[in-house]
Image (tube, grey):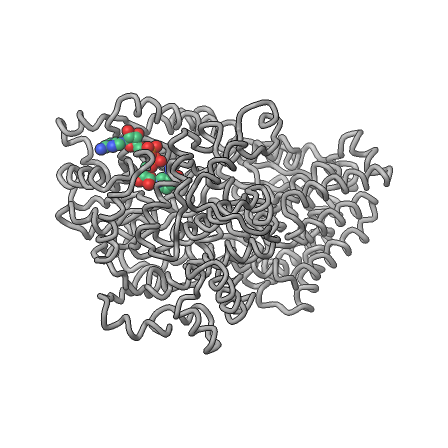
C-alpha cells in the first residue's frame, strides 16, 4: 500500500487498483503516482497468472484521475519533462501489453492522463453521471496528449473523429463518450465495479490487439491510404486555422501527430507525441494557457481556503426578475440542487422564464449532462410567484438563504426591490444584485443592514459564461462575500472579487474597446475588417459581432451609462442611438451591425447591415479617414483596454493583475493564448505601449493618453502589478483625497479607493441621458 494508491484482490482473482492520493482532493499523475503504479505493474507482469484481471478505479468521489500533475510539471526542467513523458508512455504501454484483461472503472472526472490510462486498458466502463467529464483537453493547455492518448485514440476512432475531439479539447459526459466510442459501457454508479468485473469476464486473456475497438471501415481505408489521410488532415488544418488564425501551435502539432499515428508505427507515433510536447512546452502560448489554468484553480482555492468569513450553507435561494439573466441564474441554481423561488412582476414574464428554464434543461438532456428524470426533478425545484402575491404574503421568501436580484437596470426599481427584500427576507439572508452598470453601494442604502448586500455579476449567457464578479461595497461583510463566492463555485463559475465601481472590472475594460470600435466605424472603417482584425488577434468574435450578440438595446444603455461616468476617455457616437430607435437590436431582432435574417444569413454568411453606412454618414461624428491595417486596428482597440486596466489598479477596483487577466479571459473571452490583458501588456513592454499610446493620442485625441500611473510604471521599469496598492505614481496623492479601506480577506488584500461621490453625481447625470429602451 502506498500514499497514492492501494490494491485488493477478490476471491475470483480480480485485482482492483484504487487511486486514492492521501491528503489530496483529486487524483493526478505525478511522478510518484507513476512510480507506485509501476510497482503494481511489475507485480502483475511477474505473477499475472494468479490474477484473472485488473480494474483501475478511484476512491475519490468525483474524480477518477484528472490528468498529469501540472503543479509538478511546471517545476520541471526540459530533461525532467522528457523523462516524465517517457515514464508515462512506457507505463501505459506495459498496461496495454498485460496478458490479462484490464478495465478502467470511471467513477468521476477522467481527463488527460486519466483517459490515456483508460485507453490503455482493454475496456472502459463509466458511472452514469452527467457531471463527469471525460476527454483529452490538452490542446486547451497548449500541448497535446502525449502518454499514448493521441496514438491510441486514432487507432480506435480513425483520424477524423480523433481530430474533432483533440482539436477542441472537448470533454464529454459518459453518455456522450459512449456515443463517441471513447468508452464501452455506462452503468448506474452503484453497479460500476460489478460491470467492470463483467467486462473482465468478457475479455479473454490474450494479446490486446484482439480486443481493440476498431475504427469504421471507411476510417480504416483512410488510414491505409496516405493521400486520403493527408486530405482529412489538411481539411482539419484549414478548419482549425479558420477558427484560431494559427494562434494555437498545438492545433498544428496534434494534426501532425494524428497523421503519424495513422501510419501504424506505434513507437514512431509515441516519439512524435513526445517531441511535440517538448516543443510546445517552450512556447509562450502554452505558458500563458497553463498560467490561466493555475490562476483559475487559485481563484477557486482562494474561496475555499482564504476567506475570512465562513460561507453560509445555501439550500434555498430566490431570484427576482425572470428575464434573460434571471432565468439563466435560476437554471444554474437548480442544477446545483438549490430550491429557487422565482419572482417577477409580471405573470407573462414568469411563464416565459419557465419556458426558458425548461429549454435550458432540455439542452442539458440533449447534451447528456442530465437524464430526463434529473431535468424534471430540477424543474420541480423552481417555485414561481408574482411580486404582487409576494407583497400580500410576505412569508414567501423566508426560506431563502440567498436572494439574487436581476430586474431591469433602473436604480429606482432596484432600490424598491431591495426595500421589499429587507422586509420579507430573514435578516441573515445574503442579498445580491446582478446589475451590470449600477452602484451596488447606492442599492445598499435601501436596506437596514448594508453588510448583507453584495454584487453577483453574471455574464450572458449564464449557462456558458464561466465568470462571476463578486462585488464588494464598502459595507459588504466577509460572510456575505464568502457565501456569494461559494455559491458561484457551486453554480460552476469562477468568482473574482472586485470593489464596487462603475462597470466593475469586465465591463469597465470592455466599454473603451467597444466605444473605440464605434469611433472607427464613424471614420468609415469597415466593420467586417475591424471584426476580422480582432479575431486574428485572438478575440472569439469582433466588437460588432459582440455588440449584436449582447443586444444593442442593452449595449447602448451600458455604453451611455459608463460613458457618463468614465469621463472624457470614452465617447460614444450619437448615431448608435438610432440603431436602437430603428429596432436594430442585433441578433435577437434579426438585424444589427449584421443581418441575421434571409437566405444568405441562414447559410451562415456574415452580411453587414447595408443601411448602416448611410446612417453613420448622417451622424455628427462622421469623419472619413484612411484605411487602417490590422496592427493599427488592434492598437486602437486594445490599448484603451490596457489604459483602463491601469486605472482599475490605480483606483483600487482590484489590487491584482491576475484578477484582471482572469476577468478579461473568462468574462470577455480575450485571447486566452495571450494569457489575459495584463500579460499581453507586459509581453509587449509597458514603455513600448506607452509610446504607442502617445502617438495615438496625438493623432486621434486625448482618450488615448496613457494614465499617469502607467506612464510612471513604464518610466520606472515597474510592472503593472506595482501600480496597484499604492506603488503607482498617483496613489500617493490619492491617499489624502479619497476614503480608502484596506480590507484583508477572502481573495487577499484589496484596497477600496473608489471615489463614490463622483460616481453618484455622474449617476444622476446618466439618468438624464436618453435611454433607447428600458431593458437592462
Ligand atoms: P430583462 O429585461 O430580460 O429582465 C428583467 C425582468 O425583470 C423582466 O422579466 C421583468 O418583468 C422583471 N422585473 C422588472 N421589474 C421587476 C420588479 N420590480 N420585480 C420583479 N421583477 C421585475 O433584463 P436582463 O437582461 O435579464 O437583465 C437583468 C439584470 O441583469 C439587469 O440589471 C442587467 O443590467 C443585468 N445584466 C444583464 C446582462 C445582459 O447581457 N442582459 C448581463 C449581465 C447583467
Residue closest to the far bottom: 716
In the image, 409: left or right of 645? left
The quadrant of the rendered image in which ligand 1 is seen is: top left
Q: Where is residue 305 in the image (x, y as percent from the top left)?
A: 36, 59
In this rendered view, identify the residue nearer to me: 117 or 359.
Answer: 359
Is residue 315 among what the camera can see?
no
Q: Position of residue 43 (x, y in %)?
A: 68, 55
484 relative to 575, above or below: below
In this rendered view, identify the residue nearer to me: 298 or 196.
Answer: 298
In the image, 692: left or right of 771? right
Q: Which quadrant of the view contains residue 390?
A: top left
Q: Where is residue 156 in the image (x, y as percent from the top left)?
A: 73, 38
Mark count: 0
In the image, 454: left or right of 256? left
In the image, 341: left or right of 512? left
In this rendered view, identify the residue nearer to me: 452 or 200.
Answer: 452
The residue positioned 75% from the left and 49% from the top of the image is: 257
Is residue 78 among what the camera can see?
yes
Image quarter hosting the N terminus:
bottom right
The residue positioned 51% from the left and 56% from the top of the image is: 636
Image quarter hosting the C terminus:
top left
Q: Where is residue 241 in the image (x, y as percent from the top left)?
A: 68, 45
349 relative to 460, above or below: above
The residue positioned 55% from the left and 42% from the top of the image is: 527
Amino acid at each position: 500500500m502506498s500514499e497514492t494508491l492501494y490494491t485488493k484482490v477478490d476471491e475470483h482473482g480480480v485485482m482492483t487498483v484504487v487511486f486514492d492520493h492521501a491528503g489530496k482532493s483529486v487524483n493526478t499523475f505525478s511522478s510518484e503516482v507513476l512510480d507506485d503504479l509501476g510497482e503494481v505493474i511489475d507485480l502483475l507482469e511477474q505473477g499475472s497468472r494468479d490474477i484473472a484481471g485488473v480494474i483501475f478505479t478511484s476512491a475519490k468521489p468525483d474524480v477518477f484521475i484528472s490528468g498529469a500533475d501540472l503543479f509538478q510539471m511546471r517545476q520541471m526542467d526540459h530533461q525532467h519533462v522528457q523523462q516524465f513523458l517517457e515514464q508515462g508512455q512506457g507505463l501505459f504501454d506495459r498496461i496495454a501489453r498485460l496478458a490479462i484483461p484490464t478495465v478502467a472503472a470511471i467513477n468521476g472526472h477522467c481527463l488527460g492522463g486519466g483517459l490515456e490510462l483508460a485507453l490503455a486498458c482493454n475496456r472502459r466502463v463509466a458511472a452514469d453521471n452527467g457531471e463527469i467529464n471525460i476527454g483529452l483537453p490538452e490542446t486547451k493547455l497548449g500541448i497535446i496528449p502525449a502518454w499514448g492518448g493521441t496514438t491510441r485514440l486514432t487507432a480506435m476512432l480513425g483520424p477524423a473523429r480523433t481530430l474533432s475531439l483533440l482539436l477542441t479539447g472537448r470533454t464529454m459526459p459518459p453518455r456522450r463518450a459512449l456515443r463517441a466510442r471513447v468508452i464501452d459501457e455506462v452503468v448506474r454508479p452503484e453497479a460500476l465495479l460489478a460491470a467492470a468485473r463483467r467486462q473482465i469476464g468478457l475479455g479473454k486473456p490474450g494479446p490486446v490487439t484482439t480486443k481493440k475497438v476498431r475504427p469504421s471501415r471507411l476510417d480504416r481505408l483512410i488510414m491505409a491510404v496516405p493521400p486520403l489521410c493527408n486530405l482529412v488532415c489538411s481539411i482539419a488544418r484549414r478548419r482549425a486555422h479558420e477558427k484560431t488564425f494559427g494562434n494555437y501551435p498545438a492545433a498544428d502539432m496534434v494534426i501532425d501527430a494524428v497523421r503519424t499515428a495513422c501510419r501504424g508505427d506505434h513507437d514512431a507515433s509515441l516519439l512524435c507525441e513526445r517531441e511535440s510536447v517538448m516543443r510546445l512546452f517552450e512556447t509562450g502560448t502554452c505558458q500563458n494557457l497553463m498560467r490561466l489554468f493555475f490562476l483559475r484553480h487559485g481563484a477557486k482555492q482562494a474561496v475555499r481556503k482564504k476567506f475570512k468569513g465562513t460561507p453560509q450553507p445555501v439550500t434555498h435561494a430566490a431570484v427576482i426578475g425572470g428575464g434573460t439573466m434571471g432565468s439563466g441564474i435560476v437554471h444554474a441554481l437548480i442544477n446545483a440542487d438549490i430550491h429557487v423561488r422565482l419572482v417577477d412582476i409580471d405573470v407573462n414574464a414568469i411563464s416565459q422564464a419557465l419556458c426558458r428554464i425548461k429549454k435550458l434543461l432540455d439542452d442539458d438532456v440533449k447534451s447528456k449532462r442530465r437524464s430526463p428524470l434529473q431535468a424534471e426533478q430540477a424543474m420541480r425545484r423552481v417555485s414561481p410567484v408574482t411580486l404582487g402575491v409576494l407583497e400580500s404574503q410576505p412569508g414567501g421568501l423566508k426560506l431563502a438563504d440567498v436572494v439574487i436580484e436581476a430586474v431591469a437596470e433602473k436604480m429606482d426599481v432596484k432600490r424598491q426591490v431591495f426595500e421589499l427584500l429587507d422586509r420579507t427576507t430573514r435578516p441573515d439572508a445574503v442579498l445580491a444584485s446582478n446589475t451590470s452598470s449600477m452602484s451596488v453601494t447606492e442599492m445598499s442604502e435601501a436596506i437596514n443592514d448594508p453588510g448583507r448586500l453584495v454584487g453577483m455579476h453574471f455574464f450572458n449567457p449564464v449557462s456558458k459564461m464561466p465568470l462571476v464578479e463578486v462585488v464588494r461595497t464598502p459595507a459588504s461583510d466577509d460572510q456575505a462575500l464568502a457565501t456569494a463566492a461559494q455559491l458561484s463555485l457551486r453554480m460552476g463559475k469562477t468568482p473574482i472579487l472586485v470593489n464596487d465601481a462603475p462597470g466593475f472590472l469586465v465591463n469597465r475594460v470592455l466599454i473603451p474597446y467597444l466605444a473605440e470600435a464605434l469611433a472607427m466605424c464613424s471614420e468609415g472603417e469597415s466593420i467586417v475588417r475591424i471584426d476580422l482584425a480582432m479575431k486574428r488577434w485572438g478575440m472569439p468574435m469582433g466588437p460588432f459581432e459582440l455588440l449584436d450578440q449582447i443586444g444593442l438595446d442593452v449595449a447602448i444603455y451600458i455604453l451611455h451609462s459608463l460613458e457618463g461616468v468614465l469621463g472624457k476617455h470614452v465617447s460614444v457616437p450619437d448615431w448608435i442611438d438610432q440603431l436602437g430607435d430603428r429596432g436594430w437590436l442585433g441578433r435577437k431582432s434579426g438585424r444589427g451591425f449584421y443581418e441575421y435574417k434571409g437566405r444568405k444569413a441562414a447559410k451562415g454568411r456574415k452580411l453587414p447591415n447595408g443601411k448602416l453606412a448611410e446612417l453613420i454618414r448622417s451622424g455628427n461624428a462622421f469623419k472619413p479617414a484612411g484605411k487602417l491595417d490590422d496592427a493599427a486596428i488592434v492598437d486602437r482597440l486594445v490599448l484603451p483596454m490596457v489604459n483602463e486596466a491601469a486605472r482599475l489598479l490605480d483606483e483600487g477596483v482590484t489590487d491584482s493583475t491576475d484578477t484582471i487577466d482572469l476577468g478579461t479571459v473568462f468574462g470577455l473571452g480575450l485571447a486566452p493564448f495571450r494569457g489575459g490583458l495584463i500579460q499581453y501588456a507586459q509581453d509587449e513592454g509597458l514603455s513600448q505601449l506607452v509610446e504607442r499610446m502617445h502617438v495615438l493620442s496625438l493623432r486621434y485625441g486625448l482618450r488615448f493618453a496613457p494614465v499617469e500611473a502607467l506612464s510612471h510604471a513604464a518610466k520606472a521599469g515597474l510592472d503593472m502589478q506595482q501600480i496597484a496598492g499604492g506603488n503607482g505614481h498617483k496613489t500617493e496623492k490619492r491617499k489624502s483625497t479619497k476614503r480608502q479601506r484596506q480590507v484583508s480577506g477572502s481573495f487577499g488584500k484589496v484596497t477600496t479607493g473608489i471615489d463614490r461621490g463622483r460616481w453618484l453625481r455622474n449617476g444622476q447625470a446618466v439618468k438624464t441621458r436618453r435611454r433607447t429602451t428600458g431593458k437592462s
